[in-house]
Amino acid sequence: MGLLEGKRILVAGVTMDSSIGFAVAKVAQEQGAEVLISNFGRALSITRRIAKRLPVEPVVLELDVTDQTHLDGLADQVREHVDSLDGVVHSIAFGNPETLLGGKFLDGPWDDVAQALQVSAYSLKSLTMAAKPLMAPGSSVVGLTFDATVSWPAYDWMGVAKAGLESTSRYLARYLGPEGIRVNLVSAGPLRTIAAKAIPGFSDLEDLWTTRSPLGWDNTDQEPTAKAVCALLSDFFPATTGEIVHVDGGFHATGA
Ligand code: NAD
């Protein structure tokens, strides 16, 4: 029997088959879950095509996490297909690479920073609350971060957004714990996805990981990250919330 047998899971933020969300959807299906995926805007048509590459073609929903109408309608959209959710995966981030990333930190304009914070951090709260009417005690919310306890080359304002995401996750854990809903993050090492390739200078981070991770690091393998997300979605972490699980080859534990 699979780890997620009988569970219904929404994975928000799938564009390509390189997306971490795609790998999560795949592993979740392999582990017995019924999966719904979502994306927004023009990328939605790509998502619909890519969805066919999953073991079972999932329902694809439209959800722009900055659009209150979409958020307000999410529960009804989901109910057209399943009557509840046991898990929600937030695999969403955006920061304008031309103004905020790749060494632009000191000049990043507020409007773009505000957008990055809304899409990449605040949206964990928005998505969780939009899905909450569907979640019973025992449900699990999992998001993706890139270690925000230190600064990194190139990551710039996305690092600030991730610090916001990490804190948002801890507050959600605080407020939703009494209702039996767990909220955790997986902190992944660098993976070659569209979001990552858009960051000028991201290859510097990849080089660091390759040389320093005790376990080594394959930046084209999303599966270890997806497996950790699925473990946190499962019943095997019933007393864990507000946690950040590192899936980074052990990089975070090394000083040099
Ligand atoms: P990706 O580009 O495949 O996924 C990001 C998704 O966010 C896309 O599907 C995009 O359409 C969606 N998105 C952006 N704005 C949105 C909005 N307003 N509403 C709804 N969806 C929106 O890239 P990925 O690397 O798979 O990113 C998934 C998550 O993993 C992100 O939070 C990212 O920061 C995190 N992460 C990535 C890495 C890495 O190296 N790739 C490492 C650690 C954490």
Image: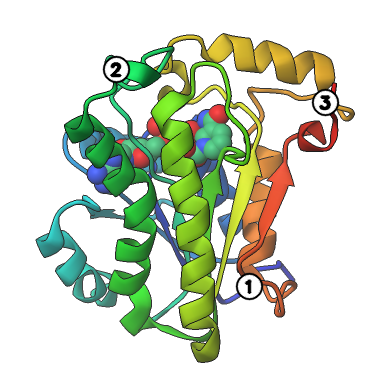
Which residue is label 3 attached to?
A: 213
Mark 2 residue crowding within 10 angstroms, few (<14) / some (14–19) / many (20+): few
Residue 111 in picture, x, y percent from top left: 17, 34
Which residue is label 2 attached to?
A: 107
| Count of marks overlaid on the render | 3
Nearest to viewer (mark 2 / mark 1): 2
Q: Residue at x 75, y 73 (%)?
A: 236
Between the C-alphas of marks 2 and 1, the distance is 48 Å
| Residue 166 left/right relative to 134 | right
The part of the image, by quadrant, that contains residue 198 is top left
Which residue is label 1 attached to?
A: 5
Residue 233 in picture, x, y percent from top left: 60, 66
Residue 78 in picture, x, y percent from top left: 28, 71
Q: Amino acid at mark 1?
A: Glu
Image vertical order of residue 238 relative to residue 184, above or below:
below
The part of the image, by quadrant, that contains residue 84 is bottom left
**In the foreground, 149 or 70:** 149
Q: Amino acid at mark 3?
A: Ser
Which structural element holds mark 3? Answer: loop
Q: Residue at x 73, y 35 (%)?
A: 248
